[in-house]
Image: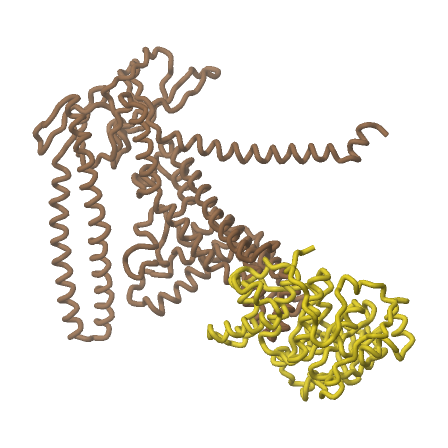
Chain colours: A brown, B yellow
Amino acid sequence: MSRLTERFRQGGIFVWFSGTLLAFCLAMILSLVGYIVAKGMGFFWPSPLVQVQTTEGPLLGEITGHEPARREETEKIQFRVANRDIYGQDFRWIPTAGLGQPEYPKDVLLIERLEYGPFIGRIASLSHEGRDVATGPAALAEALRRLPEANRQRHQIRSIEKGEVGELNRRLEKLRLSRRKLEARGDAAALQALETKVAGLQTTYDQLQTSLEKTRAEAKAWTLNLQTVDGKTKEWPLGSVVRMVPANNLTFFGKLGIYLSRLWEFVADDPRESNTEGGIFPAIFGTVMMVLVMSVLVVPLGVITALYLREYAKQGWLVRAVRVAVNNLAGVPSIVFGVFGLGFFVYGLGGSIDKLFFAESLPTPTYGTGGILWASLTLALLTVPVVVVATEEALGAVARSQREASLAMGATKWQTLWNVVLPSATPGILTGLILAIARGAGEVAPLMLTGVVKLAPAMPLDGTFPFFHLDRKFMHLGFHIYDVGFQSPNSEAAKPMVFMTAFLLLLVVVLLNLFALNLRRKLRERLGGSTF
Amino acid sequence: MEIEDPRPVPEPVHLHVPPPETSMRPASFVQPDLPLTDPAVLTSPTMLQVERLNLYYGSKQALFDVDLKVARNSVMSFIGPSGCGKSTLLRCLNRMNDLIDDVRVEGRVLLGDTDLYAPGTDVIALRKRAGMVFQKSNPFPKSIFENVAYGLRIQGEGDRSTLEDAVERSLKGAGLWEEVKDRLKDSAQGLSGGQQQRLCIARALAVRPEVILMDEPCSALDPIATARVEELIMELKREFTIVIVTHNMQQAARVSDHTAFFWMGKLIETGLTEKMFTNPGHRMTEDYITGRFG
């Protein structure tokens, strides 16, 4: 026998083959995660601001790309010059030929603004109500000192707008709806009382607006006079500045501080500038909440189905057919579920709910439009086969002796299932839930039809009664990636956001899975040496 | 091999039981000094009565015309080679065979005055009257306390002190109280094999059944644990009627008042244990008991 045949017989080659493939798969996964992390995490580190002399004049910005010479194309580098309000574009490609020695001026800075993207240049002066308070380097120092206060004021205005004004608007809207109802009924006395209420609210509203105007005016009093490297000037209110980064004049820890503050903003803040800047907190929140609502819906649905299929239904061709159908449901493209969700849940169920309970606000739909409830229900449908299959397996794995012990005690079938079989099967059911979460958290297509939006005005969970607003639209990390990366007007600037969002989506899925895994481990410990 | 409580096995009350180590003699023994059955057993009323019982698994018949009586407060053991139908018969006594598809039963089984297989019998109520202990100990993955309290809980008993009383009484009845009284909250699956089996007995006792059916309760236990369970069986018959299936002839001789020998689904012989073991009425019984086949 030749050595090769002998090796085949021993299976050594196969072990090598499968080991290599495993290593290959691991390498692919690692490089995927590594690429995303590297592309995304580096984005927040302040990069140096480079000044070069071109034929058209001086140029200041971050170097963001490089293209080597190819055929007739010369070597080029990409500058992020920012100042979109002045130059009209954020990025410029410059041929490297003829560029002078790059300089790193100490006094330039990158100013993150609420609008028009960042500004790169110098602060000429800081003025208060039109009068210059400080000029040159002193202006920068003074501006840095006053920035936290300005930011605090801005947040205050935002929270008043979102909180109190929003609440007043909601109450006014409610009164408007009941007025419509009363008008239809013709109840003059109640209508009168209502009008008084509306008037009272309106007064509060006006007062609030006045004080808001005052705060806004105060916030606008401080102005930065900005100057670009090629001498153009721009006035900018300090209240609309997010962060000032003198990138060439920072120690390592200074840079680290900027990095962490940017990271925190990204994770914990609302998006700005059509999602290309700011944070993605609403999307994280929406994703987690949607997955949780889905879990709450899918577990009872799947477990009850599996219980009936396994324990109660007479095993025969019908049950076999149902089982095959359930398994096939797992293979249906998710967009099909989305279409179903839109047609059945949103228009069908939601429309009926609106007609029955929210008739006064029609034609504005309440439940008859996409919302987190419908999206979660659609995903629950999408993932229910996984839970059914896992639960069936788990039920089948519960030892027969356990059931017999319970039945011999005089327990009914239901008591046996509830007290003995289901507790023993719980870890297996959780396995199903883990798989369902993994599938559901990353799904985007069906959500686009059933409730995900680019920018949600309010969270599906907040401090206003009834706290859970399952009718609200929500944001989702998966959709956010698509939207920021491919639907935004300034996709070049948003590219790092795409990677960061992708990384966060991975992180959310991993965390949700860890949570479920931990739950399963605890249960297993309690059950003591269950095989599942 | 599990380490059991090392305390010496006390002398049983009713019968002389040789220590397990010395009883591992070959089965070819007919002891002249086998003790006499408790005379009370001979006069006690019938607890269980099987009349012309035929049982079919699908088209295959597993029991043929079995007639049998078990006296109140006695121990009846079923012996016979594997597949002879003794476990099947035991499972007829609390209708556990209902759980298997395609089982058909003809004939009558009377528990007290109740005909178990009469139409309209409440199987759930019946199983409360006939507790069962299985070959392999099968405690639930719950605490020791919850295991014993299970039967009462499913009957809707929620009162804590009632449950505690019942659990203590049952564990004492099963001779387990002293070993577990400080760790009732611990998982039952942390107990040794012998303790688990006695826990299962305690679980059966908790609902105060009339009959306890034991399906080879000692086959997975070591000799010491076996001795303790046997001792327990003899204690329990003061209050309960016990039917035990066993492969161990010595065990049958030690614990039971009556013995029934089955072969190929037929009841070959039944009678007082000492008579069966000293002077069997049937050639086949003698051959089986002396180990010539089986």
Among the 4 quarters of the image, the one containing residue A351 = bottom left
Q: Position of residue B69 (x, y in %)?
A: 76, 84
Task: Report x, y in % for residue B86.
Answer: 78, 73
Q: Position of residue A22 (x, y in %)?
A: 62, 36
Who is closer to the viewer here, A44 or B197?
A: B197
**Quadrant showing the C terminus of chain A:** bottom right
User: Which residue is drawn at the image coordinates 78% and 33% (left, top)?
Assistant: A8
Q: Is residue B286 left or right of residue A254?
A: right
State whether residue A246 is above or below residue A36.
above
Location of residue A266 by image quarter = top left
- Would you identify the image quadrant in which residue B152 lies? bottom right
Horizontal side of A458 relative to B261 (left or right) equals: left
User: A275 or A30, which lies in front?
Assistant: A30
Total numbered badges shown on the rendered structure: 0
Q: Nearer the viewer, residue A470 or B222?
A: B222
Q: Is residue A329 visible?
A: no
Residue at coordinates 57% horizontally, 56% vertically from top-left?
A528
Task: Decide: is A413 above or below A50.
Answer: below
Identity of the residue furthest to the right in this view: B283
Location of residue A305 with respect to B257 vertically, above or below: above
Judge left or right: residue A480 versus residue A82: right
Image quarter of the N terminus of chain A: top right
Residue A155 in sight: yes
Q: Residue A61's x, y, as percent?
A: 30, 22
